[in-house]
Amino acid sequence: MSGRDRFSTATRLRLLGEQTAARVYRSQTRRQARRSRLTGRAALLALVLCSLVVALAYPMRQYVSQRAEIADVQRRQKQARERVEQLRDLKARWQDDAYAEQQIRRRLHYVKPGETGYVVVDPGAAKQARADVRAAHRPWYANVWDGVDKSDASDQ
């Protein structure tokens, strides 16, 4: 290269192009090297995260199920306490003679001397009671056939 050739525009542009191409090539090589390292790091990080998720999945499931079980036991315990309180109240009421007398009169239809007791009977229930008395005196197979006839009649 002569001195004049060295300063020509074409020569300078060619040198400049070669230098630029070399820089671009070096930066691409570095970027690819960084990408490959980053990809390896990302893969390692993903592997560690997956391992942690797998390792913690079962204990977390156990924890959640145990918390639900504890909540259920506490709910049942609260209900049992409320029931015990109701039974204590009922026991205290039965200790009162006036309450006991009221319940005996209502449930067993007791009346005091001189009082007249009345029992109102549902007519449908009375018919059913008479039918039950009649059915008790018949053979069992007659009652079975009556049941079949009744169910057949109700289907139509």
Image: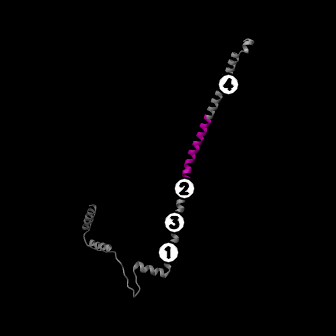
Q: Is residue 49 magenta?
A: yes
Neighbours of disc 1 within 10 Å: few (<14), some (14-19), many (20+) = few
Quick check: marks 3 and 4 in contact, CB under 8 Å?
no
Pick the residue in front: 140 or 75: 75
Residue beneath the point at 32% across and 73% down: 125
| 15 lies above or below 100 | above
Neighbours of disc 2 within 10 Å: few (<14), some (14-19), many (20+) = few
User: Which mark is in front, 3 or 4?
Assistant: 4
Amino acid found under the numbered disc labelled 4: Arg
| 31 lies above or below 107 | above
User: Which mark is in front, 2 or 1?
Assistant: 1
Left or right side of 144 for 38? right
Quick check: marks 2 and 1 in contact, CB under 8 Å?
no
Which residue is outermost to the front? 9
**In the rendering, which numbered label is found on residue 90?**
1
Q: Is residue 44 magenta?
A: yes
Neighbours of disc 4 within 10 Å: few (<14), some (14-19), many (20+) = few
Pick the residue in front: 53 or 39: 39
Query: Cα distance, mark 1 to mark 4?
Result: 96 Å
**In the rendering, which numbered label is found on residue 43?**
none
Callout 2: SS: helix
**In the rendering, which numbered label is found on residue 79?**
3
Marks 4 and 2, the one that precedes in the sequence: 4
Query: Cα distance, mark 3 to mark 4?
Result: 79 Å
Marks 3 and 1, the one that precedes in the sequence: 3
Which residue has dot 2 on it? 66
